[in-house]
Amino acid sequence: MTAEVRPHGLAIARLLVALAAFPLILEWWYALFRVASGKYLAIKLVSWAPDPTPSMVQVLASVALIAAVLLLLGVFARTAAALTAASAGLALLLDQQTYSNHLVLFVCLAALLAFSRCAEVLTFPRRNGLSSVPYWPVFLMKLQVSAVYGYTASSKINEQYLSGEVIGIHQDGIIEFPAALLPIVAIASIVAEYVLSIALWIPRIRLAATALGAGLHGGILLVFDYPIALVPFAMLMAAGYVQFWTEYRVPTRPGADEGARNSEAPQRGRQIAPSTS
Amino acid sequence: MKLASSQRFAAMEAVPESPRREPIALARVVAVVALGAVIATFPAPTLTQPGMVKFGWQMYAMSIPAPVFDVSHEDGTTSEVPAAEIAAKLRADVDYVLPGAEWICKHDATAVRVNATIGDDDAGEFVCGAL
């Protein structure tokens, strides 16, 4: 838990999460805007949540947009990540109709980024940050990806999904499977998700797992209706995938931060004091 | 005693972890394990619940038709209000039945009774004065 990794994986995750924030803000803003207008149903997640007003929704969306831009740039990145997570979380709290699984995933990943050193590299303006950062947020992001795959696969083990009916209802994209193939596609998608939840952790088969994941998410975009809504989900999962590829760990030593700052030379193979783990 | 630069580096590396940092490191490990446990187990109860449930990563697990409300009016006429017409956004994991009936009774002064159906199933009958 006290191991360290190169900062590029978290920085790429930061960029992907920030880019996904924009369509997601639009998505929850639209639902909340309609609720706040008083012309549509309002269904609070919790009874103590305030009634959304038009000005409250605009302020919330504005804060979220500014935070997303700052997160993308890597300026006050941890605060920006916390603000994007909090504003999306508040949107979820204000009305149940803002809910989507990818918005919850966004909140989880942005919250983890808020506790990580995600803006040491790939920032604008460019800065000379740390060359190694704590591993634990990376581990939790990887665990999050596995949990998403594991639970989504388990939730699909039901008669309706296994019959192919769900895919049949929602398929309206570039690829359209014949009805006879739908049960096979349904079972294959569940197997793929279970495999991904485990295989990404195994270095020997990680490349194959990544290719499988890319195929799965690419397939979702090509098969399902309204694929534009699923692009942010694919981006968020990609942010998790990147963490599986940034496993290179730099053991910590006293004063590592100072020593690592501005250091261009990779520390692979250097014999230094054992990690505090 | 003055040390050569290589000796100084070796000496620095040999310094053990400060005892004051150990509780912080332990607290961090505990926090990470706790967070990991939440990530791994929080959605588990949703697997035992019927239908589509929030916070369970149930993406495209089922397809559930949206409710339709049959509204009986004071003059004896009836009208049909699909949930899609009054919902800010349709979601399979949101229960629109009671909020929808309440909304119709509140916004349609002539409504006296609301019958909700989901697909072919009755989802509830509501008398406006009683809501």
Image (cartoon, rainbow, N blue to C red):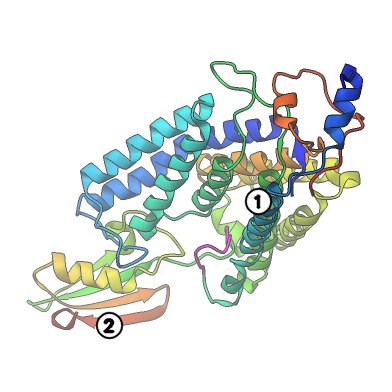
Q: Nearer the viewer, residue A243 or B48?
A: A243
Q: Are marks 1 and 2 in contact (CB under 8 Å)?
A: no
- Relative image position of residue B75 (x, y in whole percent): 7, 76
Q: Amino acid at mark 1?
A: Ile
Residue under disc 1 on the same chain as residue under disc 2: yes
* Residue at screen point 79% across, 36% down: A253
Q: Magenta segment range?
A: B52-60
- Relative image position of residue A130 (x, y in whole percent): 68, 26
Residue A256 inside the magenta-drawn segment:
no
Give the quadrant of residue A167.
Answer: bottom right
Q: Nearer the viewer, mark 1 or mark 2?
A: 1
* Residue at screen point 49% across, 49% down: A103
Q: Amino acid at mark 2?
A: Glu
What secondary structure is the magenta-colored segment mainly?
loop
Q: Residues within 10 Å of mark 2 (few under 14, many from 20)?
A: some
Q: Chain of mark 2?
A: B
Decide if residue A177 is in sight here: no
Q: What quarter of the picture does the N terminus of chain B occupy?
A: top right
Q: Nearer the viewer, residue A272 or A19?
A: A272
| Element at label 1 | helix
For the view shown, which residue lies furthest in the front direction? B1
Q: Label 1 to label 2, Cα distance in Å?
A: 58 Å
User: In this rendering, would A272 be left or right of A88?
Assistant: right
| Element at label 2 | strand
| Mark sitting on residue A5 | none
* Residue at screen point 45% across, 28% down: A69
Above or below for A69 versus A189: above
* Residue at screen point 32% across, 81% down: B124
Q: Nearer the viewer, residue A6 or B47?
A: A6
Quickly name the residue at label 1: B24
